Image (spheres, rainbow, N blue to C red):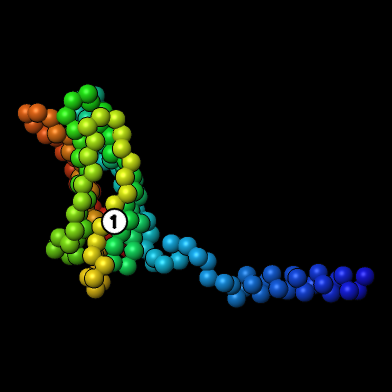
C-alpha cells in the first residue's frame, strides 16, 4: 500500500508542478498581448439593413487577422465591406470583401510585417452599391489595446 500511496503522491506532485511551472501553451493567444475586437455594421434602410458585415479582428504584432461575413439583403446591387489599417493618422493597408447576393465568409490579413510597431487602428465600413446610388454605414474604429 505504501508504494501505491507514494506513486499517487508523486503523480500529484508532478501534476501540481506542471501546472505551477507550466509549459507554454501553443496557441495564437499566447503570441498576442491585445484583446480581440468584434465588429458588426449594418447599411440601414427603412425596413432594416441593405446589407451588413460582422466578424472578429485578431491583433498581432504588426498585422491583424480579420474573419467574418459580408451579406447583401437585397436582390439588386452589391455590398462591400471596407477594412483600413492606420498607424496614427497614416493609412498603412486596406482591403475589401464584396457580395452580390446572399452571404460570403472571408479571411483578411491587414498590416505590413516590415513596419516596426505595426498599426494601431482598424477602420471598418460597409456600403450597399445600387445602380444609381450607394448607402454606407457609419465607420467603426477598433484600436489595438
Give the crowd class for mark 1: few <14, some 14-19, many >=20 residues within 10 Å.
some
Disc 1: which residue:
109
Quadrant showing the N terminus: bottom right
Quadrant showing the C terminus: bottom left
Q: Quadrant of residue 69?
A: top left
Q: Is residue 55 above or below residue 22?
A: above
The x and y percentages for residue 36 are: 37, 56
The x and y percentages for residue 109 are: 29, 56
Identified at 31% across, 37% down, the residue is 104
Left or right side of 41 for 58: right
Identified at 73% across, 74% down, the residue is 13
Residue most toward the left?
132
**Residue 114 visible here:** yes
Total count of labels:
1
Residue most toward the right?
1
**Residue 43 visible here:** no
Secondary structure under the numbered disc 1 in the rendered image: strand
The x and y percentages for residue 75 are: 22, 23
Q: Quadrant of residue 131?
A: top left
Q: Is residue 46 above or below residue 24?
A: above
Observer-nearest residue: 44 or 98?
Answer: 98
The x and y percentages for residue 3 are: 89, 74
Identified at 70% across, 73% down, the residue is 14
Identified at 18% across, 43% down, the residue is 138
Q: Quadrant of residue 110?
A: bottom left
Amino acid at each position: 500500500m505504501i508504494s501505491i500511496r507514494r506513486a499517487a503522491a508523486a503523480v500529484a506532485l508532478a501534476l501540481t508542478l506542471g501546472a505551477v511551472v507550466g509549459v507554454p501553451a501553443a496557441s495564437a493567444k499566447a503570441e498576442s498581448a491585445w484583446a480581440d475586437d468584434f465588429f458588426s455594421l449594418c447599411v440601414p434602410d427603412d425596413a432594416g439593413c441593405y446589407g451588413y458585415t460582422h466578424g472578429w479582428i485578431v491583433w498581432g504584432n504588426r498585422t491583424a487577422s480579420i474573419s467574418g461575413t459580408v451579406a447583401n439583403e437585397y436582390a439588386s446591387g452589391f455590398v462591400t465591406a471596407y477594412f483600413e489599417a492606420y498607424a496614427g493618422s497614416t493609412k498603412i493597408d486596406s482591403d475589401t470583401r464584396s457580395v452580390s447576393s446572399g452571404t460570403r465568409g472571408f479571411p483578411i490579413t491587414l498590416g505590413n510585417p516590415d513596419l516596426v510597431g505595426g498599426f494601431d487602428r482598424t477602420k471598418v465600413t460597409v456600403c450597399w452599391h445600387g445602380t444609381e446610388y450607394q448607402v454606407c454605414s457609419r465607420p467603426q474604429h477598433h484600436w489595438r489595446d
